[in-house]
């Protein structure tokens, strides 16, 4: 069985799309996932499944939630190796000391025509970003709450996305490595000042 990570978007926010994690764990176990574990209430799920591709699992999870709760959240599924690779590609060492300042956006597909010029135009001086394949790294020392770039990133990328802060990413990498028997490397840190 492979180890997978599901990232659900837009659940348990402002009293909408409420999804109890313990109930989700039970439903996914009943649907054929094994060793299901969740992390915090924003929809982070680590599990094992024999599927060979993420698309089948994204549909399975969305269908289970739709049947039980009446709504279908955006679901992005990554293999444990894909998540570890995204973490290792983190361009900012500083994120280890400020883990809520780095947000990693996981994209549903690789953007065909991201508007990077518009992103550069609206970012604040203390904000940096890097786009690599299906991952968008956004480092904002003052946080993302008032950031125009954070607010508009998905639209400017042109694809569906869900973001997690660096603390959540590294925790999920650790959870997935534990489930896979420790075979997956953790997050690499490297020097970088933003691009």
Image: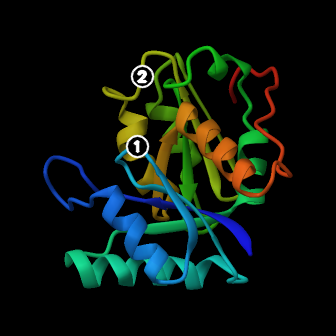
Q: Residue at x 46, y 22 (%)?
A: 124
Pointer 2: residues within 10 angstroms few (<14), some, or many (20+)?
some
Numbered disc 2: secondary structure: loop
Answer above or below: position of 194 versus 97. below
Residue 38 in the image: state x and y as whole percent: 47, 53
Query: Which one is in front in this view, the residue at disc 1 or the one at disc 2?
Result: 1
**Residue 195's x, y, as percent?**
69, 30
| In-front residue for pair 142/128 | 142
Q: Is residue 156 visible?
A: no
Percent across and percent down for residue 73 are: 34, 69
Give the side of residue 159 with respect to residue 173, left or right.
Answer: left
- Compare residues 126 and 55 and report the one nearer the observer: 55
SS state under label 1 = loop
Residue displayed at 46% across by 54% down: 162
> Could you tell me residue 61's position as x and y percent?
44, 76
Q: Quadrant of residue 191?
A: top right
Residue 30, placed above or below residue 17: below
Between the C-alphas of marks 1 and 2, the distance is 20 Å
To which residue does mark 2 refer?
A: 143
Where, by quadrant of the figure, is residue 150 drawn?
A: top left
In terms of image quadrants, where is residue 72? bottom left
State the mark number for residue 40.
1
Q: Residues within 10 Å of mark 1 (few under 14, many from 20)?
A: few
168 up-or-down from 92: above or below: below
The reply to whether callout 1 and callout 2 are in contact (CB within 8 Å) is no
């Amino acid at each position: 069985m492979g180890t997978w990570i599901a990232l659900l978007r837009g659940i348990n926010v402002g009293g909408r799309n409420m999804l109890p994690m313990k109930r989700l764990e039970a439903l996914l176990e009943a649907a054929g996932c094994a060793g299901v574990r969740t992390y915090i209430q924003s929809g982070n799920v680590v599990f094992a499944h024999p599927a060979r591709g993420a698309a089948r699992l994204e549909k399975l999870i969305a269908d289970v939630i739709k049947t039980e709760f009446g709504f279908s959240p955006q679901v992005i599924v990554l293999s444990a190796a894909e998540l570890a690779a995204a973490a290792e590609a983190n361009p900012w060492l500083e994120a280890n000391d400020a883990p809520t300042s780095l947000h990693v956006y996981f994209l549903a597909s690789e953007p065909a025509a991201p508007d990077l010029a518009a992103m550069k135009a609206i970012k604040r001086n203390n904000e940096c970003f890097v786009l690599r394949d299906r991952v968008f790294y956004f480092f904002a020392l003052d946080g993302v709450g008032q950031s125009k770039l954070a607010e508009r990133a998905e639209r400017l990328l042109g694809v569906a996305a869900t973001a997690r802060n660096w603390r959540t990413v590294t925790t999920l990498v650790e959870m997935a490595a534990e489930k896979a028997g420790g075979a997956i490397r953790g997050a690499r840190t490297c020097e970088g000042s933003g691009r």
